Image (cartoon, rainbow, N blue to C red):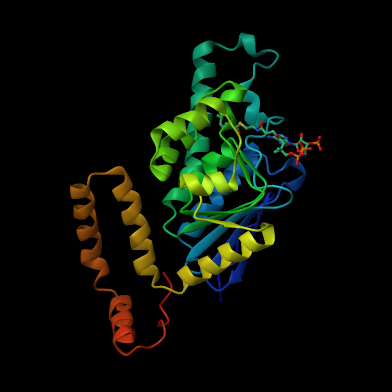
């Protein structure tokens, strides 16, 4: 029996293939804008999936006309971006502490995507603005439909992006000047440009195709040894943030136990015998 999913107000979780989980943001009428609730639910969902033995790969998408319109500009989530009536009575140090705690919390919810040992493929369509870009930079692989539009919108609402874009995007696109240009101008760029920049791996014709391609990729990844795939993600994450020497040390220490796995023996035997990919135990 496969595990059942926790229920969420603004997320729909499903299992389109064995070991593949589809996480869909479901606030279509608000263009999947991120209020406090959905933000926390994203963190909770990825934390849950991190240890779900029936999940080996994940597809993240948004329902309705677009992927994500960024922070919810009408909800409490944006309270910290605007002075509200009665605010002037609150001491500045306490206001600052509240804001910092909120920023750290939002960062944590997106970092849960990056730290989830299961690869996350994000299927983007339509607008992906502001916090939407922060979110996709925490994913492993980005596919988009031709109509996708991207914008590091934060400077246009008066702030420096603070939940991942400025920290992760330069490492993804490998181009500081380009990152700075897009972040300083809040210029909208399209899917073809995002592909050329290296932000996307693939552009598909429309939403149906981008979702299908993402799910197929997730299914392919889910057919591999979970020991191998998860060890690969953790090593790539570590290697991005450390020296070659340190990350070689990391993978040597990691693999000293993982090499003893049944998966290695099973996979090697199947390769030698030119057999199909074996069935791996849950992890
Ligand atoms: C501590 C801080 C942490 C993080 C900070 C992050 C900063 C950001 O995320 S900056 C980005 C903020 N977002 C925006 O500026 C985008 C605003 N929205 C749009 O530009 C457009 O809505 C669109 C995304 C391009 C989609 O356009 P369209 O399909 O034409 O839909 P609309 O008719 O404009 O909107 C439909 C409906 O959704 C509401 N809505 C859209 N975006 C948001 C949003 N970000 N927050 C709240 N609500 C949003 C819009 O108001 C409409 O609502 P109605 O009630 O139907 O009028």
- Name of the residue lying farthest toward the right: 29
Total numbered circles: 0
- The residue lying toward the viewer, choosing from 278 and 184, is 184
Residue at 33% x, 76% y: name it.
263
Q: Is residue 44 visible?
A: yes
Indicate the position of residue 233 as horizontal and vertical percent values. 37, 57
Indicate the position of residue 161 as horizontal and vertical percent values. 51, 30
Residue at 29% x, 74% y: name it.
261
Residue at 49% x, 29% y: name it.
181
Indicate the position of residue 39 as horizontal and vertical percent values. 59, 42
Horizontally, is 116 left or right of 80 in the view?
A: left
Q: Is residue 161 visible?
A: no
Q: Where is the C terminus found, in terms of image quarters? A: bottom left
Q: Where is the N terminus found, in terms of image quarters? A: bottom right
Indicate the position of residue 247 as horizontal and vertical percent values. 23, 51
Q: Is residue 48 above or below residue 158?
A: below
Residue at 49% x, 47% y: name it.
196
Horizontally, is 193 left or right of 247 in the view?
A: right
Horizontally, is 228 left or right of 103 in the view?
A: left
Q: Within the displayed image, which quadrant is ligand 1 positioned in?
A: top right
């Amino acid at each position: 029996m496969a595990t059942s999913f926790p229920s969420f107000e603004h997320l729909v979780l499903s299992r389109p293939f064995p070991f593949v989980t589809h996480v869909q943001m479901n606030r279509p009428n608000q263009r999947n804008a991120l209020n406090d609730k959905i933000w926390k639910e994203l963190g909770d969902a990825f934390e849950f999936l991190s240890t779900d033995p029936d999940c080996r790969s994940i597809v993240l998408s948004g329902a309705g006309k677009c992927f994500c319109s960024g922070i919810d500009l009408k909800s409490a989530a944006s309270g910290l971006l605007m002075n509200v009536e009665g605010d002037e009575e609150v001491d500045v140090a306490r206001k600052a502490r509240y804001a910092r705690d909120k920023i750290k919390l939002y960062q944590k919810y997106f970092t849960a995507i990056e730290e989830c040992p299961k690869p996350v493929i994000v299927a983007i369509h339509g607008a992906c603005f502001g916090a939407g870009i922060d979110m996709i930079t925490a994913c492993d692989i980005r596919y988009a439909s031709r109509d996708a539009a991207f914008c590091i919108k934060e400077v246009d609402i008066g702030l420096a992006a603070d939940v991942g874009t400025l920290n992760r995007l330069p490492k993804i696109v490998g181009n500081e000047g380009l990152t700075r240009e897009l972040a300083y101008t809040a210029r909208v760029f399209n899917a073809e440009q995002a592909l050329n920049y290296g932000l996307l791996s693939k552009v598909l014709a429309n939403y149906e195709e981008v979702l299908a391609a993402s799910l197929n990729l997730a299914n392919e990844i889910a057919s591999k040894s979970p020991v191998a795939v998860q060890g690969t993600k953790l090593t790539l994450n570590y290697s991005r943030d450390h020296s070659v020497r340190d990350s070689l040390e990391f993978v040597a220490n990691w693999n000293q136990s993982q090499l003893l796995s049944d998966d290695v023996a099973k996979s090697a035997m199947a390769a030698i015998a030119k057999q199909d990919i074996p069935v791996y135990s849950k992890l």
